Structures are given as structure tokens and as C-alpha cells.
Image: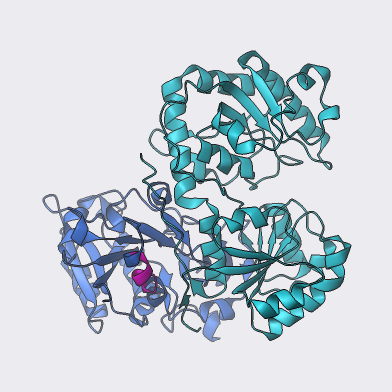
Amino acid sequence: MPPRVQHIVETRFSVRPGGDGPQGLAIEGWLEERLPLLRRFCLPSVMAQDAEFTWLVLCDADTDPEILCELRGAARSLPAFELGITGPEHGIRQAALAAVDPDTDVLITTQLDSDDALADGCLAAIQAYADSFHRSAHPDLVVNFPRGYRLDARKNALYEDRMSNSSFPSLFERPSTRNEAMTVLCGPGHATLRQECFTHQDESMHAWLIVVHGGNVINRIRSDHPRADLAAGLSRFSLADDAVEIFHG
Amino acid sequence: MSPPRELRELRIALAGSRRLGCGLAAACDVEELSSQGWREQIADRRPHILLVEGGEGVGSAWAEELDGLLASCGQERVPRMLWVTGASVDPVLLNLWEHFDRAFAVGIEPLMRLIEAGFSVPSLLWLATALPVDDLPVADTSSRADSVVCVGGWGRDCTAEWRDRLIEILRAAIPHGLRILDFAEPRALPSDLRSHLDVAASGRRAEALRRAKLTIAAEGAAPVELVVPEIVFDAAACGAAVVSPGTLGSALDFWTAEPPHRLIPEVRSREEAAAAMDHLLGDDQFRERVVHDCRRVVAYNHTYAHRAATLASAAGYRLIPDAPARSAHS
């Protein structure tokens, strides 16, 4: 009998990493810049996924209602979209666990930052491991795709990237056999997650796109990132028409 | 892209093997091909992957046969992979770049050679351990018989810098008690170190590591960046702490965030080595924690079961690495 699988893509929108509450809104204009990036890159890449999943987008309760309204409007044609509200009394953990079906045999949670994108077919490729995981002896498992791209959105330049601890990990768990799921956003953080969990590195595809846009908290283009063909690389992703001008030039 | 195909066990046909055969055989079905009989071997048992090991030269027998082997597997749609397990790449392999579907290398230098030759974005893939990580109890290495063991040593083409650094680091270990096993160039050791050679223990690497509190990761010919020698993974599996004379590069694997510190100190002088060894050997609790964390990192990421699963994914299969027999926390 196939396992009951639930796949949740977890995205922090107006909640800063490591923070609950209004810290994420401290930088003026940060969210106004974030929304166009989500529209151009993240949202269309999620909408193009040919798999069954929930997209849980986490926002702080103090987020400007106009921003929330725009966010809901942008994702209105995506049935998988679910808005999770966090605040002092109801943090990321509670919001993430509220979306989990406790009767699920295999819970998959995938981290996706709101200014990045997933390659076409990525979620289906992740879900392809569900049966094997269910039959295995692993209490939990991380599946990471080390290959991806970095897009310098200011220069329309694409670079190969490789991270064995990418910011797009997928955590497989068995919520029906343990007290409480962890979910990928509530774990130790993608940088050290594979020190805590059995990890599989999948080399089958360039699975993700990190967009470097100047307002990134962490991501940069480094000198050791080899240049990649812009059109060929971005053809693996479904992005908005105005995402990269040269791509369509 | 066609959907991935599930595999229960990966079957690899391996050519030019020097070290991968033993390691991968612990994790999957490996058939080592002979340069004379590969046609019959592949016809008898079709592999999921053809893997060619590169690094120290393919040898004249394979140099003549590789072309045909790669062409035959290409026609049969058997994915053809190259894994460079040393610091250099045989030019014979570089000239055959068009015939490989994927390429991997253990470090930056060979990766650059592959890219320059025309390989399309080769990937970094370290060696691993074939030793069982979880069959040993984790706790209490304080009663181990040996303080410091050095297994292996500088190779034929080592740099003078590496040789001199290693000599000084070995000298730092002498006050603690030092055994040197399987040293590649024993006659090149100075006399004060030659007396610590243990020829009787030759070839018993795992046993030596299980008797030791600490090992010096001396394998290789140069302090090459982003090459993690196999001894690091084997030492972790056997519960021995590690001091590295070389740069291990991708430090997040062996770096803890809370509190922030390296699990494997990188030392470049006798003074640095002495300080690292004094700390690891003088504080049993600290060493136990380091050993425990290293074992966990290796159990979760760096066994040949992991490598087999990664190779399988590159070929379009999905295969989850084996779960350990017992939890790595036991």
C-alpha cells in the first residue's frame, strides 16, 4: 500500500530568518522590493510544478495589510497557496505545524526563499523518494540537490553553483510515528542540517536558482562561480516574462 | 527529462580501479572490469553505470581499450562516468571527455583540469569510508592503547612543502607516543621518526585506527584544497580524532556552529600540531565530543553508500543510501 504523503513548501516572506515577530519588517522598503522578486521568480516557478503540494508562505501579523493583499492576489490562481501568519503568540513553529496532517505517513517539507526559484519538475523529483524513504529504516532524511544556478539580476548573468548544504533542502519525516514533526524551517538551519540528519545528495538536475539582486541578506556572486549560458540555464525554470530582459531579447 | 527510476541495488561496472573497488563494493554490486575481458563481462551482466576511476594514470592496457569500452556503453545507453580520485588527471582521460556523460573529482585542481579539457561542469565528490560507522560503541576512547597513529604518508610526487610540514607534525606527536604505519616512503623519513615505524602492523589500517586516540591525516602528496583524504572518514568511523596537515576546504562538514569550532584542526607547524594534540589528548571529554560529532557527520554524509546513491542519481536513478544498523547516537 503506498504511503500517505504530504509535501509542504515552506517560504518565509515577511519573517526574517531566525526571527519571529516584527524584526523582519525593520528595514524600510524591504518588503516592497521583495514582492516583485516573488512575482518574477518564486511564484511562477512554484506554479509550474507538476506535483501535489502545499505552498505555505509565512508572514508576520504586523505586515502591512496592503502587502498581504497583494500577496494573496498574486497567488490567487494557485490552489496550493496557504498563508501562515506568525506573531508573538504564534511563531514559525506553530504556523508550520498547523499545516501538517498528523496522519501523514511521509511528511516532506522543502525550504524555498521568497526571492529564489525551483526548477521545473523539482518537487516531483523530490517526491520520487517518498516510497523508498517509507520502506527504509531512516527515522528522517534530508534530500539536497547540490547543483543549481546563481543569477545576477543586475547584470543578467548566470553562474553555476554547487552547495552540498543548499538553502533548498527537503526534510522527510514520519509524523504519524513521532510526537511532533520538525519541518525544515524549524530545524537547525540548512547550513548544518546535514550534520543532524541522514543526507542524500541528488546529482540529477540543476534544481534551484538563487537570485542575487543587491538586497540579499547573504547571497553574493563569488569569483569561483563558473559562468553559465543564460538562456540554456534559465530554460529549466518557469519565470515571469519580465524576470530577465536579455533572456527574451 | 524522464522521471527517475527507482533502484533497490546499484550495479556498477568499474574500470581502472585503484581504490574505489573495495569502497563501493561495501555499498553496491561492483564488477571490476578487465582490460581484456570487458566485452564479455558487460554482455553477461549489463551494469546500471560504467564508472572509470582516474587519478594515477590508467595504464597502457586500459589506454588502448577505453575508447572501445566507452563507445560500447554509449551505444547500449549505459551512463558513463569518470571519478578522478587523485590530484592529477591522466591525459588519456582528458582526451576522451566527449565520451563521458558525467565527471566527478575529489578536489579543485582535478576539477579545473576536467573543465579545461571540455567536460561539462564536473562535480566535486569526495572519497568516503567503507568501514561500518555504527558497529562500534562511541564512548570512552580514553583507554585506547595508542595515542597517535599516522597511517600512510607522502606519495611519490609530494611537494617539499608537504614533506617538511609532515615531518614537523610527526615530531610534535613523539612525546605523546607515535606509531607510523604503511608509510609510502619509509626510507625518506629522518632517523628520529624511522624508529616509530611499525612494519608489523602493515595493512591493518582499521585495526590501527580503532586502537588510537588520534590520527594524523597524512595521505596525499600536497596540502591540496578541497581534498578530504579517505583517512579522515575512516578515522571518524573508527572513533579516532583527527589532526590534518592539509586544508580540508569545505569546512562546514567538520565545523560545529554551537560553539563554533573545527572538529578537525588544520595544522601547519610543529607548534600548531603540538597545541592541537595537547588539547585533544589532554581533554578526554572534549575529544569524545569531537569524535562523536565527526562520526555523526560521516555516518550521515560520507559512506560509500552515500556515494553510490549520488552516482545513481547522476545516472537518472533514485536510490536512498542505507540506513545505519543502529543510531549514530548510540
Side (left or right) of B294 relative to A174: right
Q: Colour of chain B?
A: cyan
Query: In the rendered image of this protein, does residue B83 appear above or below residue B181?
Result: below
The structure residue drawn at horizontal position 63% and vertical position 56%, both measured from the top left corner, is: A224
User: In this orientation, which residue lies closer to the viewer: B227 or A222?
Assistant: B227
Q: Residue at x 76, y 34 (%)?
A: B162
* Magenta-span inclusion, residue B147: no
Q: Main secondary structure of the magenta part?
A: helix
Quadrant of residue B269 within the rendered picture: top right
Q: What is the letter of the blue chain?
A: A
Q: Is residue A154 visible?
A: no
Viewer-nearest residue: A136 or A49: A136
Q: What residue is at 52 percent from the left and 37 percent from the top?
A: B238
Given residues B137 and A76, the one toward you in this image is: B137
State how many labels appear.
Answer: 0
Residue A54 in the image, given as x and y percentages of width and height: 25, 73
Farthest residue to the top: give it.
B175
- The image quadrant where one finds the C terminus of chain B is top left
Indicate the position of residue A126 as horizontal and vertical percent values.
Answer: 39, 71
Residue B274 placement, left or right of A183: right
Residue B265 versus residue B275 in the image, above or below = below
Using the rendered image of the protein, determine whether residue A215 is visible from the camera's viewpoint: yes
Q: Which residues are magenta?
A: A127-133
